[in-house]
Image (spheres, rainbow, N blue to C red):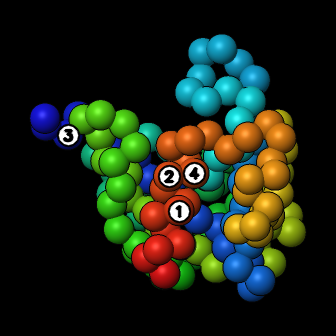
């Protein structure tokens, strides 16, 4: 099947190795409502993956991250006919001034806390996160 859409995920990781998760809005018209997920989204048609990730972080958290500090991890398939570019960004105070504009809340979570989340983490995001941990 040909790739029809592309998305990007930026795994925001703190010095302790915890990752930032967003509790998605509880709206029936979005994917994975009221579940925890990673930050990112669909790429615009002409966007490069890193630029799309920087844009998504700005849209969702109101901050601008330094593209030179993005670490490319690889490509994952999250949806049929689509691919997701996955990057790591090691946070160093950038989220101190974050203002969430998409989702209900966000927080840093350690790997051993993922299974305890209520509501749960979206399965497709969990798959990407587990793959991510295998890569780093």
Which residue is nearer to you in this view: 80 or 9? Answer: 80
Q: How far apart are marks 3 and 1 (CA)?
A: 23 Å
Q: Are marks 4 and 2 in contact (CB under 8 Å)?
A: yes
Q: Are marks 1 and 2 in contact (CB under 8 Å)?
A: yes
Q: Mark 1 points at which residue?
A: 130
Q: Distance between the residues labelled 2 and 3?
A: 19 Å
Q: Distance between the residues labelled 4 and 2?
A: 4 Å
Q: Distance between the residues labelled 1 and 2?
A: 5 Å
Q: Mark 3 points at which residue?
A: 3
Q: Residue at x 79, y 61 (%)?
A: 113
Mark closest to the chain's N terminus, 3 or 1? 3
SS of the residue under disc 3: loop
SS of the residue under disc 4: helix
Q: Where does the image place residue 135, in percent across and percent down from the top left?
A: 43, 76
Judge whether residue 1 can be spotted in this image.
yes
Name the side, left or right, on which 31 lies relative to 96. Answer: left
Judge whether residue 103 can be spotted in this image.
no
Viewer-side label of 3, 1: 1
Q: Mark 4 points at which residue?
A: 126
Q: Do the residues labelled 4 and 1 touch (CB within 8 Å)?
A: yes
The extreme top residue here reads: 28
Q: Where does the image place residue 109, in percent across and percent down from the top left?
A: 78, 63
Mark closest to the chain's N terminus, 3 or 4? 3
Q: Mark 2 points at which residue?
A: 127
Q: Do the residues labelled 3 and 1 touch (CB within 8 Å)?
A: no
Q: Where does the image place residue 78, in percent across and percent down from the top left?
A: 40, 43
């Amino acid at each position: 099947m040909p790739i029809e859409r592309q998305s990007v995920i930026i795994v925001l990781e703190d010095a302790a190795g915890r990752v930032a998760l967003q509790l998605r809005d509880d709206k029936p018209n979005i994917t994975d409502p009221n579940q925890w997920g990673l930050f990112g989204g669909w790429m615009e048609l002409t966007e490069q993956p890193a630029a799309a990730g920087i844009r998504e972080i700005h849209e969702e958290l109101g901050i601008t991250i330094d593209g030179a500090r993005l670490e490319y991890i690889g490509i994952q398939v999250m949806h049929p006919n689509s691919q997701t570019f996955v990057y790591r960004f090691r946070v160093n105070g950038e989220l101190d001034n974050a203002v969430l504009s998409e989702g209900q809340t966000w927080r840093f979570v350690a790997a051993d806390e993922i299974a305890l989340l209520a509501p749960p983490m979206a399965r497709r995001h969990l798959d990407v996160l587990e793959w991510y941990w295998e890569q780093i």
